[in-house]
Image (cartoon, helix red, strand yellow):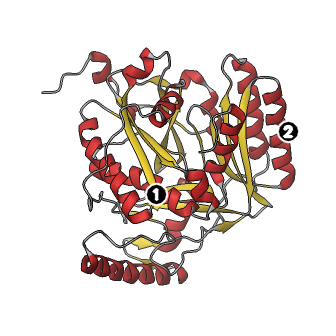
Amino acid sequence: MLTRTPEEARFRYADLPVLARFDDVLDEARFRPVPSGWTIGLCDIVGSTRAIGAGRYRAVNYAAAAVIAAMRNALPDTEIPFVFGGDGASFLLAPGEERVAAPVLSACITFVRERLDLDLRAALIPVRTVREAGHDVRVARYAPSPDVAYAMIRGGGLAWAEAALKGGLNALPAAPPGTEPDLTGLSCRFEASRAQNGLILSLIVVPRAGGDAAALRRTLAAVIGLVQADPRLGRPLPEAGPDLGWRPGAVALRPARGGHLRDLLARGRRLAGALASFLAFRVRLSVPGFSAPTYLRELVANADYRKYDDGLRMTIDATPETARAIEARLAQAEADGLLHYGLVRQGSAVVTCFTPDRLGSGHVHFVDGGEGGYAGAAAQLKRKLGAGAA
């Protein structure tokens, strides 16, 4: 029988108060320490910058979102704190859940290698290990809509764990060939959404060690304020929702290992489902139990396009003037020793969707820039920090 400390018994992520205003993520007092008995699960794509340079940004996004979908499907009755990073993903696991997560992550490594021709690495790192290294893990819940909430994380522990992952700490092995995770509800059928105000801006801002915390908060508040000052700006998806393509998905999967007939049948089912969905969204179908217009409105409202995970991440629709103002503010703060940042301008945004319940409103949608996005911004950061390319 699993024994939990009083701290662990009292802590429930789903019970944390919800932040309704995004700028509340800058308030450290609103974050709660994650118990030391919990575990960080995390993964990233090796060589993501090269893959994106080769035009495979949708595949990179799909691989990262697949890990979140697989974990949600493996623990369907648990609200798992997770963060989508574009070319990777992180999540927090209560005691005992790491035993479920290990085989799921191993299956994802194999799936991504065999079906997407990408190299995924993954690890499980105890929060206790992070604290012993001198860092913390604190979490809050931000709700962009009444139907979903996303985890916001600070304390430096997640960033440390990501670096440890790349160093090989607690690396998980791949599952046997042919093993596949349960990715029910994961899709990538929506077309890229063109910028409505000039450009799509993807940025990552991380604090500089030893910087003035109050000055950093003022800078980040000013950046967020530049976007919030104009109601046209911010959300990178059109108000009516992105267009749905007729193809089964924007990501081409390799045939399943040793399952040619099974794969053909699955492709046939995906094609039939894609055509049915395309027609339903094209005519804005509304029937008992499902409404295409309602789903699209919820998609836009639920979209995960801004977050805080040991730094500010946003993929936003902006005017060129606003983008220049944001970059000028960040460049000055970087020169003042407060932060480091990476920033990518592009013409479109892409979305990867996870709909665990087709009749519910709690579907989640991961937004990234369509021409580099978070991975491109991260590559800029690494060059500044002298860590080399991804």
Look at the picture and state if 276 lies above or below 30. below
Tag 2 residue = 328
How packed mark 2 is, by other alpha carbons closer than 10 Å (few <14, some 14-19, many 20 or more), is: few
Label 1 belongs to which residue? 118
Rendering quarter of residue 154: top right
Residue 117 is situated, as x and y percent measured from the top left of the image, at 44, 62
| Label 2 secondary element | helix
Q: CA distance from mark 1 to mark 2?
A: 36 Å
| Residue 187 shows in the view | yes
Q: Position of residue 76 (x, y in %)?
A: 29, 50
Quadrant the N terminus occupies: top left
- Between disc 1 and disc 2, the foreground one is 1
Residue at horizontal 77 percent and vertical 23 percent from the top: 337
Spot occupied by residue 134 in the image (x, y as percentages of width and height)? 49, 15
Q: Nearer the viewer, residue 291 or 13?
A: 13
Looking at the image, which residue is at 51% across and 32% down? 163
How crowded pointer 1 is (Cα within 10 Å; few <14, some 14-19, many 20+) is rated as: many
Identity, as a three-letter code, of the amino acid under mark 1: Leu
What amino acid type should be assigned to the residue bearing mark 2? Ala
